[in-house]
Amino acid sequence: MERFLDELLIEPWRIPVIIATATGIYLGFMVLAKLFGSRILLAMTASDAVIIIMFGAVAGRVIIGHPPTLAAGLLGLASLMVLEAAFGTLRRFTGWGRLLNRRPVLVVSEGTMLLDAMRTAHLSRTDVLTAVRRAGLGSLSQVQAMVFEPTGTMSVIRTGQPLDPEVLRGVRGA
């Protein structure tokens, strides 16, 4: 019974260590996402999925530590959820979100790929053409504007549609 409890519970001295490592991993991922962008969210390839799974495995091991226990895992998950809620609140009431969140980027204008903007967003020609097809268009010339969103999605506005300038407010390159 004692061995069973050892697998479930956590030594009290490990609690602040788990909270500190969860905080470090969370902040580290936020910085890496800022540096490398949200392109990985756009078109998840098999290798992207493998990388994300590996990130999760590494982060989990670092947060929970050794030996992993149920209590350590739950504490690690709870710490990450509290951090996400706290940073969400901080983003809403301060300028913190502008530091972490990428701005949307105009990557196609009037049927022309904006190569510098695509480079900044870490997008390839294939990524843009895939978004054209997903929008149900047969040609890049049918694109009035394409915006790479901070969520990793592409918004496509077709040629000939009325375009309110307010829609592109805050979009880099618009």
Image (tube, rainbow, N blue to C red):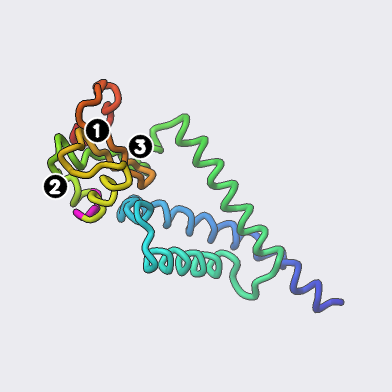
In the rendering, at what x and y percent does residue 38 appear? 34, 51
Q: How far apart are marks 3 and 2 (CA)?
A: 22 Å
Q: Out of 39 and 146, give the one closest to the viewer.
A: 146
Please state if 95 lies on the left or on the right of 103 as rendered.
right
Which residue carries the number 2 mark?
A: 116
Sequence-earlier tag: 1 or 2: 2
What is the quadrant of the C terminus in the image? top left
Tell me the residue at 59%/70% (across/down).
Answer: 65
Sequence-earlier tag: 1 or 3: 3
Residue occupying the far front of the picture: 138
Task: Give the crowd class for mark 2: few <14, some 14-19, many >=20 residues within 10 Å.
Answer: few
Q: How far apart are marks 1 and 3 (CA)?
A: 29 Å
Q: Which amino acid does label 3 sit on?
A: Arg
* The residue stretch that appears in magenta: 121-125
Which residue carries the number 1 mark?
A: 158
Task: Give the crowd class for mark 1: few <14, some 14-19, many >=20 residues within 10 Å.
Answer: many
Which residue carries the number 3 mark?
A: 98
Above or below, comparing residue 114 to residue 158 in the picture: below
Element type where label 2 sits in the image: helix
Sequence-earlier tag: 3 or 2: 3
Front: mark 1 or 2:
1
Element type where label 3 sits in the image: helix
Q: Out of 69 and 40, give the one closest to the viewer.
A: 40
What is the quadrant of the N terminus in the image? bottom right
Q: What residue type is labelled 2?
A: Asp
In the rendering, at what x and y percent does residue 75 appear? 66, 58
